[in-house]
Amino acid sequence: MPATVPLATPANVPNLSADQVQNGMLHPAIELIKLFSSTQWEEFIQEWAHSLKPQYSDVVRCGGAGDKGRDVIGYVGAASSGVWDNYQCKHYDHPLQPGDVWLEIAKACYYTSIGEYVWPQQYFFVAPRGVGTTLHSLLKNPARLKERLVAAWNSDLAAKITATGSVPLEGALQLHVSGLDFSVFKALSILSVIEQHRRTGWFAARFGGGLPPMPPDLIPPAEIAPQETRYVRQLLNAYGDHLATSLGDVGDLVPHQNLRSHFDRARQEFYIAETLRNFSRDTLQPGEYENLQNQFHAGVVDTVAGQHADGYARVIETIKTARALQITSHPLVPRVKVEARGGICHQLANEDKIQWVP
């Protein structure tokens, strides 16, 4: 009889997390990219290329009909300077072969010959299954790559370059191609792209797997920083409303130790919320932190607008409400500390979205 494999039992099943039970096994990104559509593949490369800033001043996705052999462009300096890199996205079910790239190279040759754009600084082919051995060898030998392109052009490329007519390789175009530097053509390492994409705000949304651990909380500096001035002023107004006097600066809190202690806690909360803001910027798509702030604003706005003995009482009740809010749908929820909830209220005050003393 053939050898048999025992049925998995609790003794030999790996420990499962709650996320695995709910969402299923997490598949590696290197496998998931093979399931992308061509559009999703271009979007993925665009997201990754954005992470290369400040290497690029701008990243533009041209994909679709009329791209003239360009998919994702990274401009080095101003677009008008003419220095750019191209990322040609090929989402095929096999490693790229020479026949998969001849037309794209021919388009670059033709459109630079008629002045549509200048010859790129670098031209990368990027595909989920990489490049095959033959194409890899050709990319390492620019002279041989050009020879093979010329042979392919004369056989069947001329009629495919534009939709308006055949483009034979002759005359001025042939002279143009002979002078081009084919060492710009390269293949991109997919594993390197994935690892760099992992550090962008788009990775978790595309591949799941949860968010990384939070970094250490920011610590308030001894002196009030410029970005704190508005919420600090709002707090001083609230304390002054409570004391029925005007407070010019933080030094006026010295005789009121309970208010000074509250102020110090408020600054700590603000900086913990700033840590969360930075974490969101580094791990989630743009706008996600603002979405979280908007949910907190919607949850506390009625408390802010309610009747209170004074501004300080309004602060206390609003933050108490924020700490009790049931927010479950936002991806940052597992990383929102109790202190960050108060800090988000101070961020809202810092942006004048709420006011302690109307």
Image (cartoon, rainbow, N blue to C red):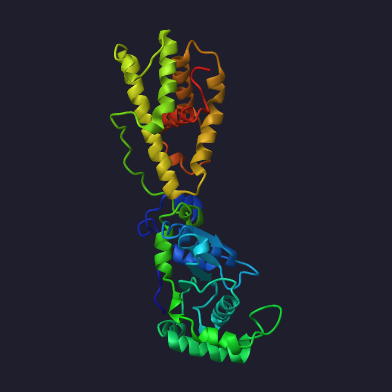
Residue sitting at the far right: 164
Residue 288 placement, left or right of 251: right
User: Residue 222 occupies which quadrant of the picture?
Assistant: top left
As drawn, the residue found furthest toward the top would be 244
Q: In which quarter of the image is residue 315?
A: top left
**Could you say which is closer to the camera, residue 173 or residue 312?**
173
Observer able to see residue 346: yes
Which residue shows up at 39% across the image and 76% down it?
3
Across and down, in percent, residue 80 comes to: 52, 62
Quarter of the rendering containing residue 274: top left
In this rendering, the answer to whether 241 lies above or below 98 is: above
Report the label total.
Answer: 0
Residue visible at 59% across and 79% down in the picture: 110
Name the residue: 44% across, 17% down: 237
Viewer-nearest residue: 262 or 102: 102
Residue 168: where, in percent of width, then height?
63, 88
What quarter of the picture does the N terminus occupy?
bottom left
Residue 339 visible in the displayed image: no
Looking at the picture, tell me which residue is in the foreground, 262 or 351: 351
Answer left or right for 93 relative to 76: right
Give how far across and how far down residue 115 sits, in percent. 59, 74
* Residue 211 versus residue 96 in the image, above or below: above
Say whether residue 170 is left or right of residue 258: right
Q: Position of residue 216 (x, y in %)?
A: 31, 41
